[in-house]
Amino acid sequence: MNERSQANGGRPLKRREFLGRALATGALAAGGAMGEMTGASAAAQSPGASGAGSRPSAGRRPNILILHADQHNARVLGCAGHPDVKTPHLDQLAARGMRFERAYCQDAICVPSRTSLMTGLYPRTTGVLWNSGTDDGQIHEGVRVEPMAAWFKARGYLTGAFGRRHLCIGADTGWDVTCTTINDPPGEAPPTESYLEWVREIGQWDAFQRDLDAEIGNRVKPSRAAVLSCRISNLTPEATREAWTARKTIEFIRKAAADDQPFFAWVPMLHPHQPYTPLPEYYKMYDQAKLTLPPNIHEPGENLPPQLEAFRSSESIPWCLGLAAKDERLYRDFLACYYGCVSQIDHYMGQILDELEKVGQADNTIVIYTADHGDFATHHGLIEKYAWGHNVYEETLRVPFIVSWPGRIRQGEVRQDLVEETDVYPTLLELAGVEAPEGYGLAGRSIAATLTEGKPTDRRYAFCESPIMVTAVGERYKLGVWRVKQRGNYPDMLFDRVADPYEVRNLAGQPQVAAEEKALRVALDEWAARTPRVVVTTPPPMGGYGWPERLRGVDDDGYPKPAGKAKSRA
């Protein structure tokens, strides 16, 4: 019997009872969460309250270091107030920089999100809305892209990518050095160095394969997979992908410092993405019995979109959430593994940050920490991201976002401004004093004035999209509009993030929020009308779960049409 059943006299909570309790808990948790969202955004030309300015000092341009996680739930950070997780190095980075509570990725799946980060364009503009296997897994012919690495390299930067690049052809260009732990789908060229080759050479391949099997082993033999894709790693600490990535990044930083050359480094680590395989020392950091479970972990399945409801009821390993719903110990073990993976990347990112100090480059390096998307991490009783079932929930769309540059960026501030990952490109251009590509329509906006002077970003809405759903995030309300017809005519999804921060009550179609819903639909229509796009028509692969039904959409509203070949539209 789980804790919620015990608290309810031994019987499971009914949907209405659950909603009442979760909403009450959420309303308390959300107190004081709102921040001002008005004001003008301008280029920072003078020092702010902290004595910071957006222009680099005389001498060479600042280094740029983008520390990047895969599938990091924004709540799962010590500095974000999480009651259990331990992230001392990222907490320290936030203390000496600025952390944004409301940063959103542009698509809650790896390759599209990374492509938006590196090109500064929305998925609809590049045509990259899925990972691979269809016409929406690569940048479409005729679409102009100016990848960030290539742009900075052409302006004198030494460029390097270290870790899980996972970028599509067209966005994966401009690197002087690429040390890659996995490159799927392949980028422009083979990596300079491959972790996969190295781990074979040192005799650790079997341990590495055992980690992979936690997620995909069932494709060969069911017993090779692990419950909820969780397994303690048998790799030696120095043989993990994180350790190898950190070493290669450190070598790169040392070379750039020795050559007195500014560098642009992107460090995308795999974890906490599945397989959830932390080293023993990080797994043991978390006492499962004492972990705090989210208030919506036992949300009734009928609340969820049909694909998510089906996913949550599965009892097949590895994605056996139906078993976890009956035995809470499985959820707790998952959280110990997920938090362990977060603490593991924190440790190795700490090594990289320490190296900046050792080579005297800490004060001349702009550091950004973020992720490509989040993970449910047992919220709604789910794990992973399950991208083909939705594109709306905070757990997968909202990402951690920390920016630090000692002496230039205001320190220790936590902001509620809406930020998109498309903002990274124009922000780095302004902070580094590098001109933008002429005639290149960057989708985001520079937040340099926010970072250096504390000015509001002046963004009313953030936009996120996938082939499944397009979402507008406002100051208080969020609307997800289906691009795929759902079984049983499951409605669009509207949430009140203040009264319902755990998103258990879908308000779409409710008269009390009709004005708010209309405003969000208008915002989506206006965004679709002004944002260049390519029309993508081929459904993404569903990984065995099946394409639910045909794409729906109308050409004049900017959403994909249900038939015909992809075309470029500006």
Image (cartoon, rainbow, N blue to C red):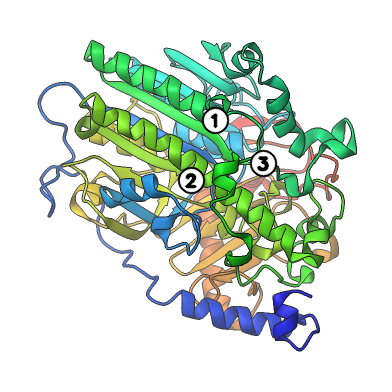
Location of mark 3 (residue): 232
Q: Quadrant of residue 252?
A: top left
Pick the front one: 447 or 290? 290
Q: What mark, if any, has residue 237 been given in the picture? A: 1
> Measured along the vertical axis of the image, is residue 198 above or below residue 106?
above
Q: CA distance from mark 3 to mark 1?
A: 12 Å
Element carrying mark 1: helix
Residue 89 visible in this rendered orientation of the protein: yes
> Measured along the vertical axis of the image, is residue 83 above or below residue 432?
below
Residue 101 visible in this rendered orientation of the protein: no
Q: Quadrant of residue 521?
A: bottom right
Residue at 73% from the left image edge and 53% from the top image edge: 389
Residue type at the position of mark 3? Ile
Q: Is residue 60 left or right of residue 440?
A: left
Q: Quadrant of the N terminus?
A: bottom right
Element carrying mark 2: helix
Q: Is residue 79 left or right of residue 116?
A: left
Location of mark 2 (residue): 530
Q: What mark, if any, has residue 79 been given in the picture? A: none
Marks 1 & 2, CB-CB < 8 Å contact: no
Residue type at the position of mark 2? Arg
Q: Is residue 370 left or right of residue 514?
A: left
Depth check, mark 2 against mark 3: the one in front is 3
